[in-house]
Each structure stands twice: as structure tokens, then as C-alpha cells.
Image (spheres, rainbow, N blue to C red):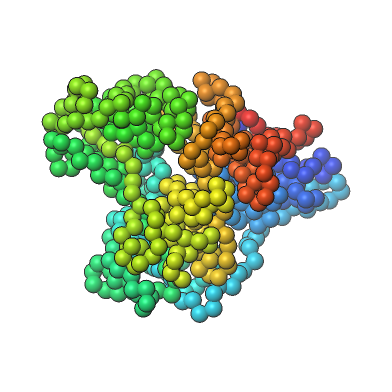
Amino acid sequence: MTEPVQRDLKAGVPTGDLIDGAMISGQVDGEAALLLRQGGRLYAVGALCTHYHALLADGLLSGTSLRCPMHHARFDITTGEATCAPALDALPCWRVEQVGGQAFVRERIVASPAPRRAAAGLRDIVIVGGGAAGIAAAEMLRRQGYDGTLTMLSADADAPVDRPNLSKDFLAGNAPDDWMPLRPAEWYAERRIDLRLKTRVTTIDVAQRRLQLDGGTTLPYGALLLATGADAVQLAVPGAAPGQVLSLRSFDDSRAIVGRLAAAKSALVIGASFIGLEVAASLRARGIAVHVVAPDAVPMQRVLGPELGRFVQALHASHGVVFHLGTTVQRLDGPRVTLADGTAFDADVVVAGVGVRPSLALAEQAGLAVDRGVLVDETLQTSVPGIYAAGDIARWPDPHTGQAIRVEHWVVAQRQGQVAALNMLGQRQRFDDVPFFWSQHYDVAIQYTGHAERWDTVQIDGSLDERDCALRYMADGRVLALVTIGRDVENLCGELALEQSAAGRDDIEQELDDALAMTFPASDPLAVDPPRRR
């Protein structure tokens, strides 16, 4: 991404040059800002996404919604509000004044969304889970003005952390411990969020609306959100010593792996999944020799298809990762690894990335409808009124595929937590977001929008080798998902096209092309940092 142009927006911009959709990069009192025109009105907002500080001028402006090119957060340019995760914090806003044919950015303003009324009589909300869905729900409840009792019960030892980074920057040694918490301890105290760590719920008394905790105490609830997430599959390997095979799900897990690396020279990663290969990349960044063992013929072929799977394999191989595909680990004898095909080598550290299972025991105990996940309606309410589910455990009716799906993505979990929070407050919002996730492998970011469990065609535009491409996963001529490398805005346009399709507009292929063409009109002389196909 390009650096923002440091144009002083307080000095004025000719209004005659500002056309609808224009995003002018600059600064206001030394702070990066954007001057935007949309619908004939002018707005000034912060130029950096409040999630990972990506340049929003490289994103997509659709109506009054500004979409981040990196992880698809959305902001309302009229208020600065972060309307869609993963960003939770609002953008700064400034007043814009038109004088003598010039637009001047003036003083900073505090613009907040119109207050909404919570459900009458709702006083006690409990969130079970301390992950992405849980913290996003808690934040949204307080943002919306809910002032009743709010309790978060987490089985983890740590407050909610930036889980995607556990296999990326933190494991690679690029992020210190204090970067990982999503919010500091005082944030919970200031918002009167009673966060209880190392706390497990053993049973739900649906009739009495009461939880039984593992310490023997009980806790009433008026509304309940189940966001228990998923547990890493624990792999039993013959000959392995207790604790030798590590998994990666929690902050404790990632710290445990790091603790083994100080004296390590080699590592075995079991499983060529996203998490497994992100671990491999992070260990290579530390100079550790890495062997990846998986039964698949091509890494991630089931999710990405053979072409992109082979590209990812070649990328890792170019960084020194040794693949053993089409086989499994037969036995561990201390550091000695023996594979089913007879290959043997030494590994000082062993990490298994072979998938997760949704944590359904509590929902099953409570008698909630369960089918490969907790079944919810379009508002994320379970089969029991007043109990909602979000994140890895939720199976919801997806309007884009016409099926009930369950998705294990960080951004999906956050957005479901937000929608569940709104609905606990009586707002009856439908969860219809297009699923999105990203995966980082060395200097290559893979962005995936949509959901395709099966497809009959993969259309590839551009070049995988040049890391400039878009892949469309299609079934019966219909685009189900879009994966891009080096084309952030095209991915945003694909997201927008899928949203429009779910709203009744069927030609996604044309919608995507139209949205991309509208992003940067050729006649626009002022889009200093234009969105582009990259």
C-alpha cells in the first residue's frame, strides 16, 4: 500500500474538483485523514483503519460505508462508527465547511450513532466464551447503551486475545506478549463488564434461566449468548511422550510452542491446514527447519482447489519447508519421527494442526437443537428463546448459499457476536454477512470472500506465480466465493457483489466487474491513492 499524501486538508480543497466517490488523502493537525464526497455531501474521517491501520484510501467507498482493504472492516463516514468487525473502534471525524468554492476541514467532532432502546426489562446478559464473538458482543452491547449487568465467562486463562496472530506474528517472534490482548484490563472495568477467567459453565437450567458454574455457584441470566468456540483436535501419535505433540488454539498454546523453540533446530508440523502452514511459516521465520506431514496429495485442496493449493505448497517449499504428502506419522521415538511411507527424520518440536471441533457439550446438555453445530435462526437465536449462539459453534441459514452453514472464521465470529448483541436488545437484525477470512504466508496474503464447500469450476484471472490473481469458485454458473492475492479492492468488490446477489440481484459476475469499474473512475483526477487491481 502507498503512503498517504500529506496534504493539509485544513488549507482547503476546491469543491469543484470533488466528485462523488472521491477520497482525498491528507492530514489534519498532523493526523492522517480523508476528505470524502458522497451523495453531494462532504465528510472528513481518519485515514487509517482502527484494526490494523491499513490505508482506507486503498479501500472501497460504497454509499456511506467505507470498507478497509486489509480485513474488510467497515465504517460509517457520517459518524465514523465501526459498523462491521474486525474493527471495533470508531474513526475520528472532523467538521467540513464550504467557503468561497473551497472545502475546509475544521475542528474535530464527536459524532455518535442515534441511541437505540434496549428490550424492556432486560437486566442480566451473560456471555459464555472469551473469544472473538464474546468480546464483540460485549462491546456492542455497551456501545448500544445497554446498562444492565453484563458478565463474560471464559474458560481461558487470558482475557480475549488477537487469536489470528497466535499462529502469525506472535509465533514468528514479531509481536510481544503485550500486543496480544484485544483490550486492556481497565477497558472491562470502565464498561462494567464482569470478565471471569478460568470459569466453566457446567449446566444451563433453561426453565429457571440459570447457569451452574464449575465452582458450584449459580448465575441467573435474562439473555444468554453461547460463544464457546471450538477445541483443537488432539492427535494421538504412537510413541509420543505426554505433552510432546502440541496444538495451537489458545494464547497458552502459542506460548508453550514458543517455549520449546529456544533450544530447537527442527520441527514437525502435522497437517497442511491453514493453521498448520501458518505455523510452518512462523517457525521458518525463526530459522527452524520444518517438515510438514499430511495425508493430502495437495495442501488445502479441499478448500482452495488444486491450483491454489499447489501454489501455497511451492511458496512454502521456496522458503525451505519440506513436505511429506500422502502419508502420516507412524511413530515418535523421542525426537525421531517415522512416517508410514518409511521416511525418518528428527524433530525437536511437534505441532499438530489437524482441525478443530465445535464445543457443543453445553448446548447439548441444555437441550438446544444441534446438528454439526448449534442450530440458529437468521437472528442467531437458538431453538430456546432468549439463548443465542455465535462463532464457531453456530450453524445459521446462509442466504448466499441457501444452506445452513457453520464457519470457523475470526471475522465471522466477531460479526455474529455483534448481531447477536443487537438482537438480544430487541432489534431483530438478520445475520446475512458474506463470510470472509484471510491467511498470511510469508509476504503473501490470501483473502477469501464467500463460502464454497463444493464447486464445479474455478476461474483464474491473472497469475498465481506473479502473485496477482483472482480465483472465482463457481457452481452451475454461479459465483460462490472469490479468492484474491494482491487484489484487495477486487476482493471488496466481490464481497459487495455477493451481498447484492443475496438481496435479489443474480448476476454476480457482472456485479463484480461493475463494482470494480465504479471504484476508480478514469475521469477522477483527485483520487490520490486510488483503489486498484494489484
Q: Position of residue 32 (x, y in %)?
A: 62, 43
Q: Is residue 416 visible?
A: yes
Q: Position of residue 134 (x, y in %)?
A: 42, 59
- Left/right placement of residue 241 relative to residue 422 reads left
The quarter of the picture where the C terminus appears is: top right
- Left/right placement of residue 268 relative to residue 420 reads left
The quarter of the picture where the N terminus appears is: top right
Q: Residue at x 35, y 52 (%)?
A: 358
Q: Nearer the viewer, residue 360 or 515?
A: 360
Q: Residue at x 58, y 62 (%)?
A: 429
- Left/right placement of residue 231 relative to residue 313 reads left
Asked where in the image residue 6 lies, by quadrant, the reply is top right
Task: Name above or below for residue 38 compared with residue 418.
Answer: above
Q: Position of residue 395 (x, y in %)?
A: 45, 54
Q: Nearer the viewer, residue 140 or 5?
A: 140
Task: Name above or below for residue 525 compared with residue 429.
Answer: above
Q: Residue at x 36, y 26 (%)?
A: 297
Count of marks overlaid on the render: 0
Q: Is residue 447 visible?
A: no
Q: Nearer the viewer, residue 159 or 223?
A: 223
